[in-house]
Image (cartoon, grey):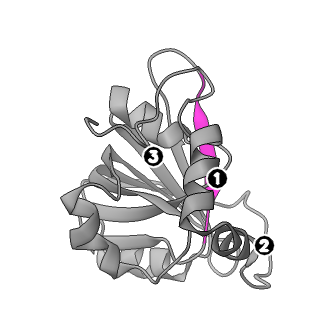
Amino acid sequence: MGKRSKSLDSKQIEFIAKQKLFFVATAMKDGSINLSPKGMDSFRIIDNNNILWLNLTGSGNETATHLQYDKRMTIMFCAFEGKPMILRLYGEARPFHKRDAFWNEHIGQFPEIAGGRQLIHMKIKLVQTSCGFGVPLMDYKGERNMLNIWAENKGEDGLNEYMGLKNVKSLDGLPTGIFDESS
């Protein structure tokens, strides 16, 4: 059933490449736990122990806040078709913004997607698989393009205004670092 390792193997990398959806979880010692579904072409495996994820503008910015206080992050993939499996990546992560050199060095690994707000780099400490027998079979029907259309219609200035209203404080009232030059 379940297995643990310190890095991704080739079969796990192949499994991840086929997934259309993943979940990201972060938390601090106190306050709200964040668990978010993610999709689109926003996940990259750098090597067996490092991943990049392009975090897109949304109604909150919990991950970036949590990672400033506690670097722990878990990413989970589930097989919704084919052979059942759940794969979790546990590690330490750091957000990088458009103002950071890291962003400029790595953003080219992703297609142009309007609304990118952070690149999250995670160093994998533990890979865990489990059976996934309880995960339902579901058919993939395609990507939603609503987020792209929304972000493109907003434009850079509109996105910055939106982030200023929705992305500067976490649910618990802590700064997200979205516009902070010192984060």
Q: Viewed as shown, does residue 168 lie left or right of 81?
A: left
Location of residue 104 (image quadrant) = bottom left
- Label 3: state its secondary structure: strand
Residue behind mark 1: 58
What secondary structure predominates along the stretch shown in magenta? Answer: strand
Q: Position of residue 143 (x, y in %)?
A: 71, 80
Q: Are marks 3 and 1 in contact (CB under 8 Å)?
A: no
Residue behind mark 3: 74
| Number of numbered markers | 3
Q: Amino acid at mark 3?
A: Thr
Is 81 placed above or below 86 here?
below
Q: CA distance from mark 3 to mark 2?
A: 23 Å
Task: Answer few, some or many: residues within 10 Å of disc 1's Cα (few below 14, many 20 plus, some between 14 and 19).
Answer: some
Q: Nearer the viewer, mark 3 or mark 2?
A: 3
Closer to the N terminus: mark 3 or mark 2?
3
Residue behind mark 2: 137
Q: Amino acid at mark 1?
A: Gly
Looking at the rendering, the stretch of residues picked out in magenta corresponds to: 32-39
